[in-house]
Amino acid sequence: MLAALLLASCRFLQTGDPADLHPTAPGAIQVVGNCTPTCTDSVDVVAMGVAGFLVVPWRDTTQLVLTAPLFSNPSVPWMMFGDLFFGTQPDTATITRRLQAMPAANADRLSRVAAVVVGHGHYDHLMDIPPLVSRLPNARVYGSETVANLLAPVSALRTRRVIVDSTAGRDANRPGTSYAVGSAVRLRAIQWAHAPNIGTITISPGHQRTPRRTLPRTVHGWKMGAVYGYVIDILAADSSVAFRLVFHDAAANADVQRRTGEVIATMPPAHQTIAMITAANFDQPAKYPDILLAHLAPVHVILGHWDDFFRSSDAAERVVRGIRASELVARLAPFVGNRWTAPRAGAITRFRW
């Protein structure tokens, strides 16, 4: 990793001002939706940090969905030197402090999480799940075989790991199947990909083919594995799809985006579609997120993974290293104009219909 950083452009060691993203303040509620004449339902999407979001459907608040958050943010110097010699563990004190600062992700709500979706096994998506398990007593964790094997040492999860490899959608001919999460929520995994982190280098590639006996000691032990995006469907009382969230936690190439659009086209239509895209490495693959947005025509975009996760989560947010926020905004404009949100941890985006 050190060699990769030294060989890469210095922009990968610098973090940017988030002003171009107009981040939503912690605790603030951004309301999206013009109901005529009145609203009948809503969904809150609570930003939790990096690619973590808590999805709260108001028709049934007993079945919440969480995308894997990160609060333990090891710094660049630690990643380059300290991790090798001392290893990296979740920062439980920071996790507790950050959750206490997020009333919208309180203990009662976390206890009602029924599904945690994990796109891939890298540390910035999976490392903080084990210490969160005690707060998620009713949650199943959905992810690849690698994700399941990495979490094997967590005894409380041994019967609550769902491997999505065989049910994930691939394309129009292999659209996959959905999981029922209570009466109002459906999940479907879709084969996705992970753009290189730096140049042509993807950090911690590979798979965890067998169950681990202990959790990884270093960040590099958290292998990427197969990568998935997810469709989170919120159902209306008549079982139609009132609201669809299309989530992924890594940038991907044009072909992957196209095939994702094919899979979603085979699914029941949704009244509203929201795209939850990742800002990190957005400029590495060609035409990201252009192809996906063209297929989905979303009413709104939520930016995830835009904050610098090599910086303390207690510090003021900066833009993730290696990207230019102004370029990302320009890329979104032809598809959604200004209908996008970059929420800070603790901010709420409320969708009404």
Image: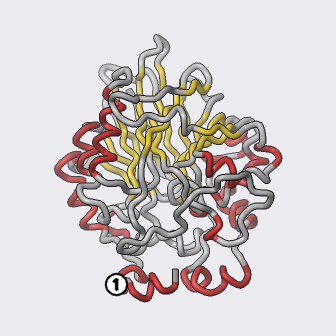
Residue with the most extreme top position: 238
Whether residue 20 appears in this view of the structure is: no
Residue with the most extreme right position: 155
Whether residue 245 appears in this view of the structure is: yes
Residue lying at 69% horizontally and 55% vertically, measured from the top left: 150
What colour scheme does the image use?
secondary structure
Query: x and y percent of residue 115 in the render?
Result: 62, 37
Query: x and y percent of residue 97 in the render?
Result: 70, 63
Vertical position of residue 45 compared to residue 12: above or below = above
Query: x and y percent of residue 10 in the render?
Result: 37, 86
- Number of callouts: 1
Left or right: residue 38 versus residue 207 is: left
Residue lying at 71% horizontally and 76% vertically, measured from the top left: 87
**Residue sitting nearer the eye, 169 or 242:** 169
Left or right: residue 17 versus residue 119 is: left
Residue lying at 66% horizontally and 60% vertically, measured from the top left: 127
- Asked which secondary structure carries label 1, the reply is loop
Residue lying at 38% horizontally and 26% vertically, measured from the top left: 353
Residue with the most extreme left position: 334
**Residue sitting nearer the eye, 223 or 66:** 223
Vertical position of residue 44 compared to residue 270: above or below = below
Dot 1, how many residues are within 10 Å of its Cα: few (below 14), some (14-19), or many (20+)? Answer: few
Left or right: residue 111 versus residue 231 is: right
Quarter where residue 259 is shown: top left
Callout 1 amino acid: Ser
Quarter where residue 74 is shown: bottom right
Query: x and y percent of residue 109 in the render?
Result: 67, 39
**Residue sitting nearer the eye, 178 or 191:** 191
Residue beneath label 1, please?
Answer: 9
